[in-house]
């Protein structure tokens, strides 16, 4: 069970709250400091210079702020600084996947009926051409033949190895846009590495990746639009949610994993951010996956058990998790952008409206019963 605890200094009328997500690993003495909206960049620079001598990251696109190791004295001073909105302890985010066996997800999103007999994926040949997809994950094996030269490694916020040492990110990218396993087979794929070989990454680095993505997107040639995949989760984080909101407000579609704890997705970030498109997972028999989170924060469900997709070392692998469900929705968003003149902010509602309704079993109360479709089913 995840909890969110907010501490503040009772004596200070204008004290900034200190947010500590419980139930997750915390990076010792590392904090993310978010400035007030009306605080100018000079105030951020001044704070970094006078209080924090070695900031790990500074943020200027998502919000004004930084992440750094703080002494108790520095933390106390920052909590009383009127330019500070809130301070959040850096924690560790994880990819949301488990493992298992057999490809069927693409067929399911282009057929109205379930079943092993449905093995074809029907789609418009535009296939997301002209779109770009950012995958914030463990990286992508960009030279995998399934990507046909459409994948690029653009930035790394975890280590010095610009490669996918795990496979999680490559699998996700394959479901989004590989030639055989992808929903949008012609989208461009951009890897922003924010998780390590164990699918773990500190919230400070993930925020840096999100901040970078917003700026980098303005330099890309993506005439049909940009979508973003984040198959990660952490106990409720105001900073991660603020960053997710900014990505969407900047004109980009963001799909996020509901999480794999068989609990209410409202306890987890970024799945509890209303502006993100939150995805739960289903099995081949149209039941909610036993691990999938649920609740009012979930927007749609997508195939997430025994999903076959690309893997590292030129391979292919079967994986399960809401991490695997999410790229079906990200790929579908890119696919629809390639077909329609639509704003990214409208895509999640469009995907929900196109979904099959009330066909899934095992859906708890206060949870949508919507299974995604690409609109090509006969």
Image (cartoon, rainbow, N blue to C red):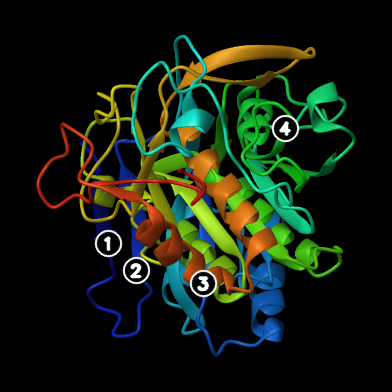
Mark 1 highlights which residue? Answer: 7
Farthest residue to the front: give it.
Answer: 378
SS assignment at label 3: helix
Q: How far apart in space, not on screen, are marks 2 and 1 (Cα)?
A: 6 Å
Q: Which mark is residue 17?
A: 2
Q: Nearer the viewer, residue 118 or 209?
A: 118
Q: How far apart in space, not on screen, are marks 1 and 4 (Cα)?
A: 46 Å
Tag 4 or tag 2, which sits nearer the N-term? 2
Q: Is residue 374 above or below residue 175?
A: below
Question: Which residue corresponds to the image point at 28% horizontal and 29% vertical from the top-left?
Answer: 286
Q: Nearer the viewer, residue 372 or 67?
A: 372
Question: Which residue corresponds to the image point at 61% horizontal and 66% vertical from the top-left?
Answer: 252
Q: Nearer the viewer, mark 3 or mark 1?
A: 3
Q: Is residue 298 above or below residue 327?
A: below
Residue 46 image point, x, y percent: 69, 78
Q: Which mark is residue 246?
A: none
SS assignment at label 4: loop
SS assignment at label 2: loop
Q: Which mark is residue 178?
A: 4
Q: Nearer the viewer, residue 135 or 116?
A: 116
Q: Nearer the viewer, mark 2 or mark 4?
A: 4
10 Å crowding of disc 3: few (<14), some (14-19), many (20+): some
**Left or right of 287 on screen, residue 195:** right
Q: Which mark is residue 345?
A: 3
Question: Which residue corresponds to the image point at 71% horizontal and 65% vertical from the top-left?
Answer: 225
Residue 296 image point, x, y percent: 22, 55
10 Å crowding of disc 2: few (<14), some (14-19), many (20+): some
Tag 4 or tag 1, which sits nearer the N-term? 1
Disc 2 and disc 1 in contact, CB within 8 angstroms: yes
């Amino acid at each position: 069970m995840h909890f969110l605890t907010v501490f503040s200094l009772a004596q200070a009328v204008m004290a900034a709250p200190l947010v500590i997500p419980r139930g997750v690993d915390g990076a010792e003495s590392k904090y993310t400091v978010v400035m007030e909206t009306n605080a100018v960049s000079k105030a951020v620079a001044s704070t970094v210079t006078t209080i924090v001598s070695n900031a790990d990251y500074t943020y200027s696109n998502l919000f004004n702020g930084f992440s750094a190791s703080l002494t108790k004295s520095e933390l106390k001073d920052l909590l009383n600084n009127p330019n500070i909105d809130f301070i959040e302890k850096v924690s560790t985010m994880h990819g949301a996947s488990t493992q298992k066996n057999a490809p069927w997800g693409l067929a399911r999103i282009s057929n109205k009926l379930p079943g092993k007999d449905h093995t074809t994926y029907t789609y418009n040949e535009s296939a997301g051409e002209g779109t770009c997809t950012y995958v914030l994950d463990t990286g992508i094996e960009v030279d995998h033949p399934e990507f046909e030269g459409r994948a690029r490694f653009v930035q790394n916020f975890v280590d010095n190895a610009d490669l996918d040492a795990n496979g999680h990110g490559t699998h996700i990218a394959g479901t989004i846009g590989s030639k055989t396993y992808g929903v949008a087979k012609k989208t461009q794929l951009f890897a922003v590495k924010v998780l390590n070989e164990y699918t773990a990454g500190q919230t400070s680095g993930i925020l840096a990746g999100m901040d970078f993505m917003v700026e980098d997107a303005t330099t890309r040639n993506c005439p049909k639009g940009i979508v973003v995949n984040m198959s990660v989760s952490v106990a409720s984080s105001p900073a991660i949610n603020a960053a997710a909101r900014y990505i969407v407000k900047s004109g980009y579609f963001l799909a996020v994993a509901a999480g794999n704890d068989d609990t209410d997705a409202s306890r987890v970030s970024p799945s509890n951010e209303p502006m993100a498109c939150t995805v739960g997972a289903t099995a081949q028999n149209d039941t909610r996956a036993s691990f999938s989170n649920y609740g009012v924060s979930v927007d749609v469900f997508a195939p997430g058990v025994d999903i076959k997709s690309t893997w590292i070392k030129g391979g292919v692998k079967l994986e399960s998790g809401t991490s695997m469900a999410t790229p079906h929705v990200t790929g579908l968003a890119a696919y629809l952008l390639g077909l329609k003149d639509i704003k990214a902010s409208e895509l999640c509602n469009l995907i929900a409206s196109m979904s099959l309704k009330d066909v899934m079993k095992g859906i708890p109360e206060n949870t949508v019963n919507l299974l995604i479709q690409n609109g090509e089913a006969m």
